[in-house]
Image (cartoon, rainbow, N blue to C red):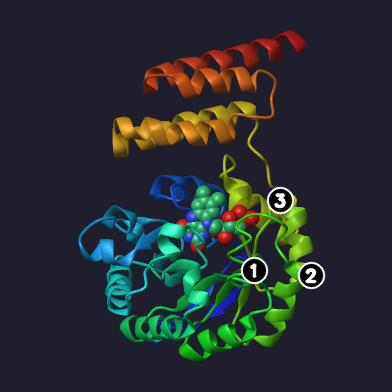
Amino acid sequence: MSSNIKLKGRGVNRIIKSKVMLSPLAGVTDIIFRRLVRKWAPNSLLFTEMINATSLKKGYGTQKINQIDLEEGPIGVQIFDNRPYAVSEAAKQAEDSGAFLIDINMGCPVKKIAKKGGGSALIKDRKLAIELVKNVVKAVRVPVTVKTRLGWDSKEENIEDFLFKLQDAGATMITLHGRTRKQGFSGKSDWEMIGRLKKLLEIPVIANGDIKNPDDALNCLKKTNADGVMIGRGILGSPWKIGEIDYALRENKNFKEPNIEEKLYLIIEHLDELVKEKGDHGLLIARKHISWTCKDFKGASNLRNNLVRAVDKNEVKNLINKMIKTLNNKKNILA
Ligand SMILES: Cc1cc2nc3c(=O)[nH]c(=O)nc-3n(C[C@H](O)[C@H](O)[C@H](O)COP(=O)(O)O)c2cc1C
């Protein structure tokens, strides 16, 4: 089974050499986090956080696309907005910065965004959605993709028609989160419906929603026959997860999940990078990653409570080094 996904651009075609992708995750998938994910997943397509096109034009959020040309492997840039001109301009800027492809967000349920006509509101305003895709396809040479949901309020909104129109407008891949906007994150991602839609489309379809481990990915691919899977919440606290799933899909049994000590060192590495890049604010961002990673071992909850209260980088490091020492002492006693 080939892992390659072929995408057509207006001037540049792309091949994604892995069936497992990292979701765009606002507040999570910044360059520092992507670098961690990349260690285990050299071929996967990783996405930026969603970027507001109008803000980008005004000079805000440029750090989200700076340096992607220096990153290893393919990086997709996701844009959201309801203004066709702003979206095309932002797409051009992202392409110039080294985007492997441009994705348009048509699934975000956040009220502030949908109210202005962006994100999932585009499922309702199909004319505008098509205009956005057509404009971006004209503006850039790299492939243009769309990430969306199964409907706005219900699954009875003829989403097929929406997807056909996106395909005709030049979208070269569609990611489907198997929920409606109304569902938010409730209920289950409807892999069966994703499978039915996949059958109808000519372009690659990526299944998304509730895929957290290799078994989920295998089951989802079997049920949907999708061209790939996209992982969102499953990556939180486990930056190796995309790699782990990728290994499993290739039937490669050599994947080694980091042990507790390695996970603790990973927290230090992540924190160091965040503080180097963002100063004191880096510690705040690190706190949420720490609480996601520091789990599932004896003493984890105690350590986590202390870590998220630590006032600076050194305190975090001291607490972690102390824990590593304790773990090593226990190992030596048992040996
Ligand atoms: C913290 C967080 C941030 C998200 N940010 C984005 C985003 O920027 N763009 C987007 O298309 N979806 C975003 N999503 C949705 C995910 O990409 C994904 O579609 C959804 O979480 C379902 O997949 P999962 O079950 O694997 O998490 C976000 C989800 C979460 C939990």
Q: Which residue is mark 1?
A: 228
Which mark is first along the chain, 2 or 3?
Answer: 3
Of helix, strand and loop, which one carries label 1? strand
**Rendered image quadrant of residue 220:** bottom right
Disc 1 crowd rating (10 Å Cα; few below 14, some 14-19, many 20+) is many
Compared with 228, 251 (above or below) is: above
Question: What amino acid type should be assigned to the residue bearing mark 3?
Answer: Asn
Report whether 23 appears left or right of 202.
left
Q: Position of residue 285 (x, y in %)?
A: 41, 36
Q: Please give the label number shown on residue 159.
A: none
Q: Residue 101: x, y in percent?
A: 43, 72
Residue labelled with disc 3 = 213
Mark 2 or mark 1, which has the lower sequence index? 2
Q: Which residue is mark 2?
A: 223
Please tell me which residue lies in front, 11 or 86. 86
Compared with 252, 142 (above or below) is: below
In what element is the residue under mark 2? helix
Where is residue 53? Give x, y as percent: 31, 67
What is the quadrant of the N terminus in the image?
A: bottom right
Residue under the point 56% across and 45% down: 239
